């Protein structure tokens, strides 16, 4: 299993959790972003800077993620692409996305996009909290422990 992170919008607290987990479990972690990211020195952690442009990080992750990998993203279209390849998706708030719930997520995203294009203010996501970081850490740990048990 490799860990892939859609890092442009990934909260710093989540990146820190991922750094610790990658080192502890010796799991390859790759952060993909349009900007340069400083990552801690580790043979398990690397960052890839992709060219500036719409969805360039998503395209790179979708091209490289494989069956059994874990992708960290809040991007619903990216999640749908990698789930179709057999990857597991965890959003930064700790929600696991899979074949059973991604269709609903895509439909809701499309519905909200339609509302916004019609001028409706749909608001944005709630502020990221320490409870979100804890939920993410707990879910990540559970996924990594299950992997190690195989």
Image (cartoon, helix red, strand yellow):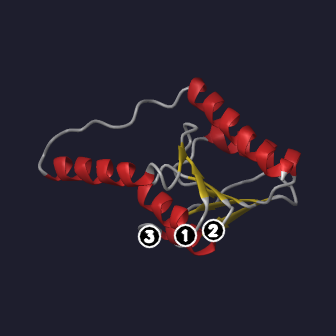
In the displayed structure, would residue 88 be above or below residue 93?
below
- Label 2 residue SS: loop
How crowded is the residue under tag 1: few (<14 C-alpha within 10 Å), some, or many (20+)?
Answer: many
Which comes sooner in the sequence, label 1 or label 3? 3
Whole-percent x, y for residue 149 in the image: 85, 48
Few, some or many residues within 10 Å of mark 2 (<14, 14–19, 20+)? many
> Would you say residue 50 is visible in this rendering?
no
Taking the image as shown, residue 110 lies to the left or right of residue 126, namely left
Image location of residue 18, percent across then percent down: 72, 45
Label 2 near label 1: C-beta < 8 Å? yes
Give the quadrant of residue 30: bottom right
Q: Residues within 10 Å of mark 3 (few under 14, many from 20)?
A: few
Left or right side of 40 for 112: left
Q: Is residue 92 above or below residue 138?
A: below
Residue that badge 2 annotates: 65
- Disc 3 is placed on an element classified as loop
Foreground residue among 11 and 74:
74
Relative image position of residue 52 (x, y in whole percent): 49, 69
Determine which residue is flagged by label 1.
62
- Tell me how far mark 1 sits from mark 3, CA to CA: 15 Å
- Against 28, residue 137 (above or below) is above
Q: Which residue is painted at 54% across and 40% down in the image?
A: 95
Labels 2, 3: front one: 2
């Amino acid at each position: 299993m490799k860990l892939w992170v859609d890092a442009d919008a990934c909260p710093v607290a989540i990146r820190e959790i991922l750094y610790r987990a990658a080192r502890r479990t010796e799991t390859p972690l790759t952060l993909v972003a349009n900007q340069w990211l400083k990552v801690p020195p580790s043979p398990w952690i690397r960052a890839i800077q992709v060219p500036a442009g719409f969805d360039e990080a998503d395209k790179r992750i979708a091209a490289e993620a494989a069956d059994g990998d874990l992708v960290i993203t809040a991007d619903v279209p990216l999640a749908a692409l990698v789930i179709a390849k057999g990857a597991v998706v965890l959003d930064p708030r700790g929600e696991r996305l899979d074949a059973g719930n991604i269709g609903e997520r895509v439909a809701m995203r499309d519905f909200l996009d339609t509302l916004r294009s019609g001028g409706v203010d749909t608001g944005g996501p709630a502020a990221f909290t320490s409870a979100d970081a804890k939920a993410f850490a707990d879910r990540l740990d559970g996924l990594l422990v299950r992997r190690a048990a195989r």
